[in-house]
């Protein structure tokens, strides 16, 4: 029975306790909500290219679809849920699973044919080179006295 | 069955948060599945590889720590940011029916799987009853 006693020791701080309750409630609804949680992503951009990193742990790359159309990058896929045998009981379910789809507008037109992607350590890295015509150019100014 | 208490997440390791003030420490999402002979604990640790992972047990508390290396090598400006190079940390209190000496761990594609076998005496047993 000692885990129960330990638990009460941890819960003396009501603020921490409320925070944990809030997180647990969020997770509860994350796991069972109708729409699965969308994967988080970062975008970096400079004059040459945009780099998008998507957090997609435990996904088979066969189940990821990438498309670029009209300056919009779309990432579609499916994250597998834990497979349960008949006797198994899932006592905690926080990891998002199911189908997801995210679209982001890129900061400039990209060379759709030169987009590359690699999947490493659960992160999907997408490299999108900028279209030559959309790169910033310095415009010479002719001074007339 | 004592499923509710077998893996109780403990409070966040605040000491670790204070030691590395520049990096945020996140609690990774976890699934727990109880099988007849073992407990499976699955954690999402995107960006963590074997080098950055540390799994330890102390005083019946299983602690998982993972750190993400900064993946953005280019100095391109962040245009949109939803996550960052961070540390993951989460602890679980283990109940006495789990065999702490035989925990197996595997990390693949940013997902950590831990198999915590139950002690022999805690496994469900079938007792055959002779019918007369």
Image: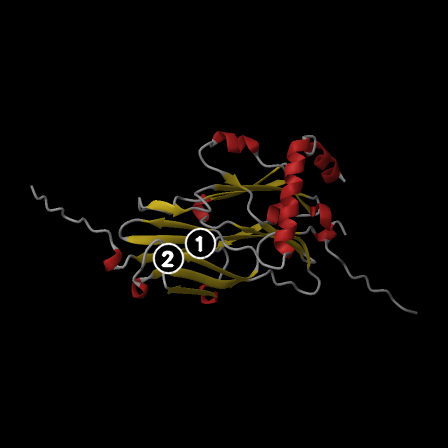
Q: Residue furthest left?
A: A145
- Locate residue A63, reporting x and y percent: 48, 66
* Residue behind mark 1: A54
* Residue behind mark 2: A126
Q: Secondary structure at mark 1?
A: strand
- Distance between the alpha carbons at the discs numbered 2 and 1: 8 Å
- In this picture, residue B5 sits left or right of residue A136: right
Colour mode of the rendering:
secondary structure
Q: Residue at x 70, y 65 (%)?
A: A86
Q: Are marks 2 and 1 in contact (CB under 8 Å)?
A: yes
Q: Residue at x 44, y 54 (%)?
A: A54
**B58 up-or-down from A44: above or below:** above
Q: Secondary structure at mark 2?
A: strand
Name the mark on residue B46. none
- In this picture, residue A44 sits left or right of residue B112: left
The residue closer to the viewer here, B129 or B122, is: B122
Tell me the chain of label 2.
A
- Locate residue B24, reporting x and y percent: 48, 38
Where's the C terminus of chain B, which quadrant? bottom right
- Locate residue B117, reporting x and y percent: 64, 52
Rendered image quadrant of residue B61 = top right
The residue closer to the viewer here, A138 or A57, is: A138
**B129 up-or-down from B64: above or below:** below
Does the image show residue A128? yes
Does the image show residue A93? no
């Amino acid at each position: 029975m000692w885990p129960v006693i330990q638990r009460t020791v941890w819960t003396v701080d009501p603020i921490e306790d409320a925070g944990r309750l809030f997180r647990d409630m969020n997770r509860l609804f994350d796991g069972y909500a109708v729409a699965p949680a969308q994967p988080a992503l970062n975008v970096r951009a400079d004059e040459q290219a945009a780099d998008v990193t998507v957090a997609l742990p435990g996904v088979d790359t066969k189940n990821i679809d990438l498309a670029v159309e009209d300056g919009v990058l779309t990432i579609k896929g499916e994250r597998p849920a834990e497979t349960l045998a008949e006797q198994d009981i899932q006592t905690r379910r926080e990891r998002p699973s199911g189908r997801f789809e995210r679209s982001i507008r890129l900061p400039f037109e990209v060379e759709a044919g030169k987009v590359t992607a690699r999947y490493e350590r659960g992160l999907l890295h997408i490299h999108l080179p900028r279209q030559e015509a959309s790169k910033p150019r310095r415009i010479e100014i002719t001074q007339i006295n | 069955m004592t499923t509710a208490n077998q893996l109780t997440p403990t409070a966040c390791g605040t000491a670790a948060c204070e030691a590395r003030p520049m990096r945020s420490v996140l609690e990774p999402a976890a699934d727990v599945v109880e099988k007849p002979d073992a407990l499976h604990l699955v954690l999402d640790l995107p960006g963590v590889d074997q080098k950055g992972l540390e799994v330890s047990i102390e005083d019946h508390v299983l602690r998982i720590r993972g750190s993400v290396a900064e993946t953005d090598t280019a100095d391109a400006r962040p245009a949109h940011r939803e996550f960052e190079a961070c540390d993951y940390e989460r602890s679980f209190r283990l109940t006495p029916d789990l065999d702490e000496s035989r925990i197996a761990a595997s990390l693949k594609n940013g997902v950590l799987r831990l198999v915590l076998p139950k002690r022999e005496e805690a496994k469900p047993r079938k007792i055959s009853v002779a019918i007369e």
